[in-house]
Image (cartoon, rainbow, N blue to C red):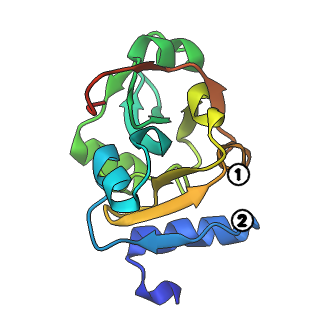
Amino acid sequence: MWGDLPEGARRVQQFLFERGSAAVVRLLPETTATAQDAASALGVSVSQIGKSIVFASESETLVAVASGDQRVDAQALARAADVAEVKRMRADAVRRSTGYVIGGVSPFGLPAAVRIFIDSRLLDFTECYVAAGHPKAIVQIAPDELVAITGAVVSPIALKVQSEQS
């Protein structure tokens, strides 16, 4: 069954399986590369989509997961990570640092050196949807399980925005 999944999605499913999660990677016919794309494809609110944005500090890679209707606040993320500054990574650096392409960056199956931060607002939901290693792959999961199996730091790192941009 996992053989039908693209490589990145297979890696996410293996990660979930190894941690005893019942969450299942789903491939959708439409792209889920943006929070709005994912919400439309799933028929849910964009706020239930946990988008992953990748940042770099002076010495490490950080993945920030925020509700789809939020914008990650770089200063708040830097404070939460206890670093001087963070900058959003370019697509080629994201791929090298996480092993995933933009639009498919998952909080699961990341290299051990990557730190994960989840905006505290995402925990207001009983379930959320996050990218699963490919621009058409998604995982539905309880936010508290997301935190537990990734070891993420929960902090208020995002701001509400009117548009769907990050």
Name the spot of residue 78 as percent of width and height, x first.
48, 15
Seen at 28% across and 52% down, the residue is 37
Q: Is residue 85 visible?
A: no
Q: Position of residue 88 (x, y in %)?
A: 31, 28
Which residue does the image show at 54% across and 11% down from the upper left? 79
Would you identify the image quadrant in which residue 28 lies?
A: bottom left
Relative vertical location of residue 47 with respect to residue 87 in this rendering, above or below? below
Q: Where residue 102 sits in the image (x, y, percent)?
A: 29, 50
Q: Are marks 1 and 2 in contact (CB under 8 Å)?
A: yes
- Amino acid type indicated by mark 2: Ser
Q: Amino acid at mark 1?
A: Ile
For label 1, count other residues whose C-alpha is less than 10 Å away and answer few (under 14), some (14-19) or many (20+). some
> Is 134 or 87 nearer to us in this picture?
134
Q: Is residue 75 left or right of residue 37?
A: right
Image mark for residue 149: 1
Q: Is residue 50 left or right of residue 28?
A: right
The numbered mark, 1 or 2, whose residue comes first in the sequence reads 2
Q: SS at mark 1? A: helix
Using residue 51 as the reference point, say whether residue 96 is left or right of it.
left
Residue, disc 2:
21
Mark toward the viewer: 1 or 2? 2
Q: Give the spatial CA distance, label 1 vs label 2.
A: 8 Å
> Looking at the image, is 113 positioned above or below residue 14?
above
The dot on residue 128 is none
In which image quadrant can residue 40 be found?
A: bottom left
- Disc 2 crowd, CA 10 A, few/some/many (<14, 14-19, 20+): some
- The structure residue drawn at horizontal position 38% and vertical position 37%, both measured from the top left corner, is 53
Give how far across and how far down residue 115 sits, in percent: 56, 36
Q: Nearer the viewer, residue 18 or 61?
A: 18
